[in-house]
Image (tube, grey):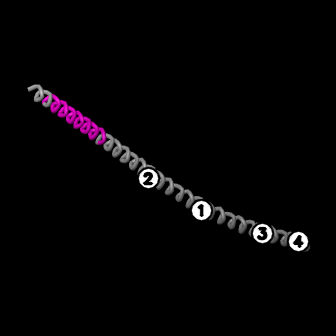
């Protein structure tokens, strides 16, 4: 009877050990699942931030292209104004020459 009792005690201890290992495995699995969920959340947040950064970069690129186009337009307008100024200066010089000729003609007469 004592042998059977000792064998039963050993069997119970072995069962408790197995149950302890099973509980530890379950806790580890839960911890792993939590870690995987946390990692998935971090990846999702990183993807969201990356997409937001890409959108801001695209918007900045659009603004830069618009500014470049405006600068190009302003440069073309400045060139056109310079050409108009040069033409006006030529007309003024021609008018001054004509006035000088008239004065000379009047002086000769």
Q: What residue is at 39 percent from the left and 48 percent from the top? A: 48
In this view, the residue farthest toward the left is 1
Q: Which span is picked out in magenta?
A: 8-32
Q: Quadrant of residue 81?
A: bottom right
- The numbered disc on residue 95 is 3
- Residue highlighted by disc 1: 72
Q: How far apart in space, not on screen, are marks 4 and 3 (Cα)? A: 14 Å
**Could you say where residue 20 lies in the image, as x and y percent from the top left?**
23, 33
Q: Quadrant of residue 80?
A: bottom right
Q: Is residue 18 magenta?
A: yes
Where disc 3 sits, the SS reads: helix
Q: What residue is at 15 percent from the left and 31 percent from the top? A: 12
Above or below, 45 relative to 10: below
- Residue highlighted by disc 4: 104
4 and 2 marks in contact (CB < 8 Å): no
Tell me the crowding category of disc 3: few under 14, some 14 to 19, or many 20 or more residues within 10 angstroms, Cα based: few
Tell me the crowding category of disc 2: few under 14, some 14 to 19, or many 20 or more residues within 10 angstroms, Cα based: few
Above or below, 62 relative to 106: above
- Residue highlighted by disc 2: 55
Q: Nearer the viewer, residue 59 or 84?
A: 59
First reached walking from the N terminus: tag 2 or tag 3: 2
Q: How far apart in space, not on screen, are marks 4 and 1 (Cα)? A: 48 Å
Instruction: Single out the mark in the foreground, 4 or 1.
Output: 1
Q: Does the magenta stretch include residue 75?
A: no
Instruction: Single out the mark in the foreground, 2 or 3.
Output: 2
**Could you say where residue 83 lies in the image, as x and y percent from the top left?**
69, 67
Tell me the crowding category of disc 4: few under 14, some 14 to 19, or many 20 or more residues within 10 angstroms, Cα based: few
Q: On the picture, is 2 further left or further right than 24?
A: left
Q: How far apart in space, not on screen, are marks 2 and 1 (Cα)? A: 26 Å
Q: What residue is at 50 percent from the left and 53 percent from the top? A: 60
Q: Which of 66 and 28 is in front in this view?
A: 28
Where disc 4 sits, the SS reads: helix
């Amino acid at each position: 009877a004592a042998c059977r009792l000792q064998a039963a005690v050993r069997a119970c201890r072995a069962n408790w050990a197995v149950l302890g290992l099973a509980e530890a495995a379950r806790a580890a699995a839960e911890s792993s699942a939590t870690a995987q969920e946390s990692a998935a959340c971090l990846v999702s947040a990183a993807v969201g931030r990356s997409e937001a950064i890409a959108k801001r970069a695209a918007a900045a690129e659009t603004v830069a292209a618009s500014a470049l186009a405006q600068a190009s337009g302003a440069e073309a307008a400045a060139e056109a104004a310079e050409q108009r100024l040069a033409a006006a200066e030529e007309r003024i010089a021609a008018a001054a020459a004509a006035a000088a000729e008239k004065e000379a003609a009047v002086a000769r007469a």
